[in-house]
Amino acid sequence: MRRTLPIFLAFLVMGFGDVVGPLVGLAKESFALSNTVAFTLTFMGFIMFGILSLPIGIYQDKKGKKFILLLGLSIAFLGMILPTFTLSSFVILLLSVLFLGAGATIMQVAGNPIMRDVSAEGKYARNLSLGQFVKAIGSLSGPVLPVLAVRYWHADWKIVFPIYGVIVLLTIISVSTLKVEEKKYEKSEPASFRSCLALLKNKYVLMMVMAIFVYVGAEVCMSSGIPLYLKEQFGINIQKLGLLGTGLFFTALMVGRFLGGVILTWVKAKTFFVVTSILSIVSILGLYLGSATIAIIAVIFIGLTFANIFPLVFSITIEHMPEKTNELSGLMITAIVGGAIIPPIMGMISDLTSSTLMGFLVPMAAIVYVAWTALINLKNA
């Protein structure tokens, strides 16, 4: 636990990168922005995954995971410092989010594989699921802290930045003092863009990278589509009922990741991957049964069953080719851009059919693909 604690703290900080979502509404009100301008915040945070992941994975092959993790933490810290001293304009906030998004991306490239270096034999998948649980706590702080600041602390929502800044600084100190024995493997050549892209010629690697791509897309489809679905099908007003909808989905994700960490203590990762993928499909089908009660239960189970897919795909792939850890990490974190590409397809189908329910066929198809990859992995176990 002493070796994994600093890495778990880094996962908490990774979650702060998701604060950009709740910041959209707050920034729009504070700076009198249009919707288009306000939503550039989410774009600035998300685009970093596509731009930075692969080059950082290559750089990590030369400098090591701990160095890259500290680099990501330092850049995120810079993102917290900027608005702490002055937040007089939207440009400052935009720069802050840019640094925070870049830092979170770099931390994910390093943090996911370095967990393997600090984990006991056979505990990597479990610890990665627990890391995602801790990350979810950081993500949930985004909508919670501003509310606490305004309602109970009589402070401005911008107080989140110095609070996050202190936590990031403590994490930097903690990781700096950690001794990490990074597993070294003999390679025919150092990592490069060419060697990374060449990995996609490997059918197994391509299959697993695509699993990350479609899964993240499916998760974003669910988080954005569930409130629309509940209102459209059952007239449930999400704003009035609070936890129902997206909040309920994300809470279930967080709980599911904790439970996944416990389950993986006894169950093999590839077996759990098959079970949770199939249960995800069954849970999505629950949305089509026409009952509001069943729909709410289905939303909870979708969150619980989706929760561990990302860490399972990541850890199983790394364990399959540990000598290519840095290249694989870069490729898989790059694949997170699926969260920007898959949801518009769901939106198009929803518009064409005038039904959000029909739009859910898109994430359903994505999870069917994920379940197929899970069965392939179990067959080859």
Image (cartoon, rainbow, N blue to C red):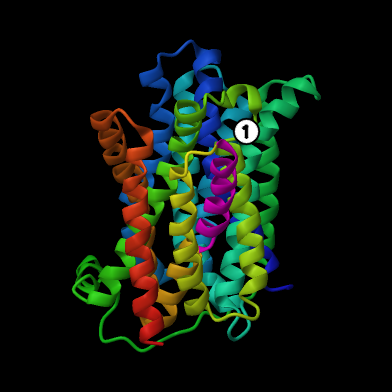
Point out the stretch of residues depicted in magenta: 292-308
The quarter of the picture where the N terminus appears is bottom right
Q: Is residue 274 magenta?
A: no
Front-most of residues 379 and 24: 379
Residue 96 placed where, x, y %?
Answer: 50, 34
Front-most of residues 275 and 260: 275
Residue 76 placed where, x, y %?
Answer: 54, 45
Q: Does the magenta stretch include residue 299?
A: yes
Please report the residue visible at 38 percent of the width from the left and 20 percent of the height from the top. Answer: 37
Type of the residue with mark 1: Pro
229 up-or-down from 297: above or below:
above
Q: Is residue 130 visible?
A: yes
Give the farthest residue toward the front.
Answer: 290
State whether the magenta stretch is mostly helix, strand or loop: helix
Please report the residue visible at 42 percent of the width from the left and 34 percent of the height from the top. Answer: 42
The quarter of the picture where the C terminus appears is bottom left
Query: Image quadrant of residue 212?
Result: bottom left
91 up-or-down from 321: above or below:
above
Front-most of residues 270 and 182: 270
Residue 73 placed where, x, y %?
Answer: 55, 52
Q: Name the residue under label 1.
A: 143
Apparent side of residue 352 relative to residue 273 in the rendered image (left or right): left
Please report the residue visible at 37 percent of the width from the left and 43 percent of the height from the top. Answer: 360
Apparent side of residue 163 relative to residue 65 in the rendered image (left or right): right
Label 1: which secondary element: helix
